[in-house]
C-alpha cells in the first residue's frame, strides 16, 4: 500500500500526559491547513532506543518529534547526527530525519531568546556593547539559556546556584563569559546587570523565592523567569513592583516548538497572541 502523504510527529517523555506540545502543533497544523498529526507517545525508560530505531527504519511513519524528560540525554547519545547547538548544550529536544539520518537539535535556547524578543527590542547586546546577565539555577534547564546568552554576545554571565559546585561545573564545561558565583554575592551581581533570568525551580506553584534587590539593576534592565506556573512568579512580581521591565516564560514553550514544526511539516509557523491565549486557557 502506498504511504499516505500525511506527515506525523511526536512528543515523548515520561510522564507525557501534561505536555502542551500536542495542542501547540495541532493548532498550527489546522491553521496552516496541513495534512499532519502530532501526538504524545508515552514510553518506559528502556523503550526509547527501540522507538528511535523504528523511526529510522521507517517501521513507524514519523518525520521526527520532541523529546522531553527523562529522554533528552539518551536522545543526545542515540541520534546519528547532532547539530552544533545540540553538541554544545549536551541534550536533544528535537529530532528530525534528513538525508537518511536521524538528527538531533536543541531549540530551548532559541525559544528563550525569541520569547524575550517579544517583550523587548533592546535586551540583547548590540555589537561592541557590554552587557551583563545574572542567571539563577544550574540545572538541566539552564544549559541552553547559558549557551544562548554566551552566543548572543553577553560579556558577563554570572551564574548563581544553591549548590555552587554545579554552577562551577557549568562554568568549566561551557566556558566563555560564564562565571560561577556564590549565592551570598547575588545582590552584588545584580548591581548594574542588564538581565536577570531565573532558571531554577524556585517560585514554582507560588513557592517562596529570595527577595532580590532588582532596583540595583541597570537602566532598562529586564527580569525573566522560565517558571510559568504561576505566569507572574514572585521574582516577576518583585521586579515589577520596583519598576523593572519583566517577561514571563510562557512564550519560551511556544517559540521552542517553531523549528521542529518547520523540520517535520515544511512550513515555519508563527507564535501569535491568539496561540498564546488558546494554550494558556487550555
Ligand atoms: P531542571 O532540569 O528543571 O533545571 P534540576 O536539574 O533538578 O531541574 O535543577 C533545578 C534547579 O533549581 C537547580 O539549579 C537547583 O539547585 P541545586 O543545583 O542546588 O539543586 C534549583 N533549586 C531547586 N530547589 C531549590 C531550592 N529550594 N532552593 C534553591 N535552589 C533550588
Image (cartoon, rainbow, N blue to C red):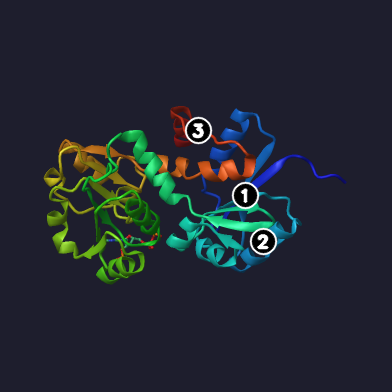
Residue closer to the observer: 240 or 61: 61
Seen in the picture, residue 115 relative to 181 is either above or below; the reply is: above
Q: Could you tell me which residue is drawn at 30 percent across and 34 percent down?
A: 121
Q: CA distance from mark 3 to mark 1?
A: 19 Å
Element on which disc 3 rests:
loop
Where does residue 243 sit, x and y in percent of width and height? 16, 35
Whether residue 250 is visible here, answered yes or no, is no
Where does residue 191 sit, x and y in percent of width and height? 12, 50
Q: Are marks 2 and 1 in contact (CB under 8 Å)?
A: no
Q: Could you tell me which residue is drawn at 23 percent across and 40 percent down?
A: 237
Mark 2 or 1, nearer chain start: 1
Residue closer to the observer: 208 or 219: 219
Q: CA distance from mark 2 to mark 1?
A: 11 Å
Question: What label sits on residue 51 in the rendered view?
Answer: 2
Q: Is mark 3 within 8 Å of ligand 1?
A: no
Mark 2 or 3, nearer chain start: 2
For ligand 1, which image quadrant applies?
bottom left
Q: Which residue is mark 1?
A: 10
Q: Which residue is mark 3?
A: 270
Graded by Cα atoms within 10 Å as few (under 14), some (14 to 19) or many (20 or more), the crowding at tag 1 reads many
Is 199 placed left or right of 258 in the picture? left
Mark 3 or 1, nearer chain start: 1
Q: Nearer the viewer, mark 2 or mark 3?
A: 3
Q: Is mark 2 within 8 Å of ligand 1?
A: no
Element on which disc 2 rests:
helix
Where does residue 95 sit, x and y in percent of width and height? 58, 54
Is 39 placed left or right of 257 in the picture? right
Q: Could you tell me which residue is drawn at 43 percent across and 46 percent down?
A: 110
Amino acid at each position: 500500500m502506498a504511504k499516505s502523504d500525511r506527515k506525523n510527529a511526536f512528543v515523548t517523555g515520561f510522564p507525557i500526559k501534561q505536555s502542551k506540545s500536542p495542542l501547540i502543533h495541532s493548532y498550527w497544523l489546522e491553521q496552516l491547513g496541513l495534512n499532519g498529526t502530532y501526538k504524545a507517545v508515552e514510553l518506559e525508560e528502556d523503550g526509547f532506543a527501540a522507538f528511535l530505531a523504528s523511526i529510522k527504519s521507517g517501521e513507524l511513519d514519523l518525520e521526527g518529534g520532541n523529546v522531553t524528560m527523562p529522554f533528552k540525554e539518551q536522545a543526545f547519545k542515540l541520534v546519528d547526527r547532532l547539530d552544533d547547538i545540540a553538541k554544545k548544550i549536551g541534550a536533544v529536544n528535537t529530532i528530525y530525519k534528513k538525508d537518511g539520518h536521524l538528527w538531533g537539535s536543541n531549540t530551548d535556547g532559541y525559544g528563550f531568546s525569541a520569547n524575550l524578543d517579544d517583550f523587548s527590542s533592546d535586551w540583547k547586546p548590540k555589537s561592541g556593547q557590554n552587557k551583563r546577565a545574572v542567571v539563577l539555577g544550574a540545572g538541566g534547564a539552564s544549559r541552553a539559556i547559558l549557551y544562548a546568552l554566551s552566543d548572543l554576545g553577553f560579556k558577563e554571565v554570572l551564574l548563581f546556584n544553591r549548590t555552587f559546585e554545579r554552577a562551577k561545573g557549568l562554568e568549566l564545561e561551557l566556558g566563555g563569559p560564564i562565571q560561577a558565583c556564590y549565592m551570598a554575592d547575588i545582590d552584588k551581581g545584580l548591581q548594574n546587570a542588564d538581565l536577570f533570568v531565573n532558571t531554577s525551580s524556585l517560585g514554582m506553584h507560588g513557592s517562596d523565592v529570595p527577595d532580590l534587590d532588582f532596583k540595583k539593576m541597570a537602566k532598562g534592565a529586564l527580569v525573566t523567569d522560565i517558571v510559568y506556573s504561576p505566569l507572574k512568579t514572585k521574582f516577576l512580581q518583585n521586579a515589577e513592583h520596583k519598576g523593572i521591565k519583566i517577561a514571563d516564560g510562557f512564550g519560551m514553550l511556544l517559540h521552542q516548538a517553531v523549528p521542529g514544526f518547520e523540520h517535520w511539516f515544511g512550513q515555519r509557523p508563527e507564535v501569535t497572541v491568539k496561540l498564546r491565549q488558546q494554550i494558556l486557557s487550555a
